[in-house]
Image (cartoon, rainbow, N blue to C red):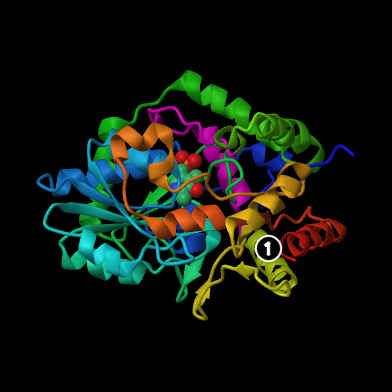
Amino acid sequence: MIREVPPTAGLPLELADFLPASDELEASLASRFGLPAPLVTSSGAGALWIALEALKSLRPERRVVVVPAFTCPLVALAVAQAGLEPRLCDTRPGHFDLDLESLRDQCGADTLAVITTHLGGRIADAVGAAAIARAAGAFLIEDAAQALGAYRHGESLGLAGDVGFFSLGAGKGLSIYSGGLVVSRDGTVRAALEATQARLVRAKPWLEAWRSLQTIGLWAAYQPFGLWFAYGQPLRRALADGDLIGALSERFAPEIRTHRVGRWRRGVGANAARRLQPFLDAGRERALLRIPRFEAIPGITVLQDGPEDAGTWPYFLLRLPNTEQRDRVLADLWPAGLGVSRAFCHALPDYPELRNFLGDADVPNARDFAARTLTVTNSPWLRDEELARICAALEAAIA
Ligand SMILES: *Cc1c(COP(=O)(O)O)cnc(C)c1O
């Protein structure tokens, strides 16, 4: 049957979202999530680039940015584009979050900023990372690209450090096909972000017109029938060619291009944002029902949050006992249209195109995490019999 479940639970756009909006995207997100004066950017990576340029202008003598060794390759590309020097920090065992002991070793008088990642709605210890960054005189940037709407101690992610950013890209919760947000609670940093955006970002009407068409395309394609063509078929072709980086859409242009997001797409985002909280709440309820299904399989761990945290659940991050078993599951389920995938292809030093810039690094935990994890969608379109099929494949691979 022609049907595809997306790998993450994105909020589907509705036709009515294309009508004029009654509120501003920035003001709407500020009030819904308690974000102080967010700036809208053309992508999450663009938001990070602006953040790095802004922080660089505040402490020009510092050049090093500490990056988690397991994260989106765009994070490393943004550091390169800002002309800064990356330093990879290993993750803690079995997790994507920074290993705080390694982080302490990596931070010094040359450190401009530390980046920590809230991956897939799961909540990293940004408070611990912020304390270490600040002790070295560095800033903390929270990469909440995949975690808009997640809270820690009743407060939105992105506010524990100096800068936070979110993605409004396709498949990441609230989406206007391509967009981002950058926030800071600190007045000096916020002024630097605004000045940097004014200095570096221009309106590009033709590019914005193209993005508007792509946003309409996202509305049309983001349902199980359309996704089979737009997402599933290219995925299966890439997998058949053994092209994992293509399968994960991780072949990025070296340059992160930014431009001003137009009024119409901001309005689309503002309209859709009204449905985001109920959509995330339903996702959390669904997650609570689905997690025990995975955890009942001996050997499977689902990454979860602490008791004070309320993450979002676009997908589940599953850790398996070893790579062989993980790969057996993926061979069966990745092409199957059930929303089973991987977070990222490699630990950062293992991307050939990043090798020149990053060099090699001894990051065994990040490599182990990349090699033993997979993701299962928390899309509302995943049917119960499909979830049962996924669980059966997990059981068979581990038995
Ligand atoms: C997607 C993503 C980004 C970049 O966001 P874009 O909007 O795609 O540029 C950065 N960090 C993480 C963890 C991401 O998942």
- Residue 181 at x, y = what percent? 43, 47
Highlighted magenta segment, given as a residue range: 248-276
| Residue beneath the point at 42% across and 22% down | 204
Q: Provide the secondary structure element on which disc 1 rests.
A: helix
| Residue beneath the point at 34% across and 71% down | 127
> In the rendered structure, which amino acid carries the disc numbered 1?
Gly
- Residue 219 at x, y = what percent? 70, 37
Q: Is residue 244 visible?
A: yes
- The residue labelled by disc 1 is 283
- Residue found farthest to the top: 206
| Residue beneath the point at 50% across and 26% down | 208
Q: For mark 1, does the 10 Å Cα neighbourhood hold few (<14), some (14 to 19), or many (20 or more) residues? A: many
- Residue 319 at x, y = what percent? 59, 63
Which is more toward the observer, 382 or 212?
382
Q: Is residue 197 visible?
A: no
Quadrant of the image containing the C terminus: bottom right
Quadrant of the image containing the N terminus: top right
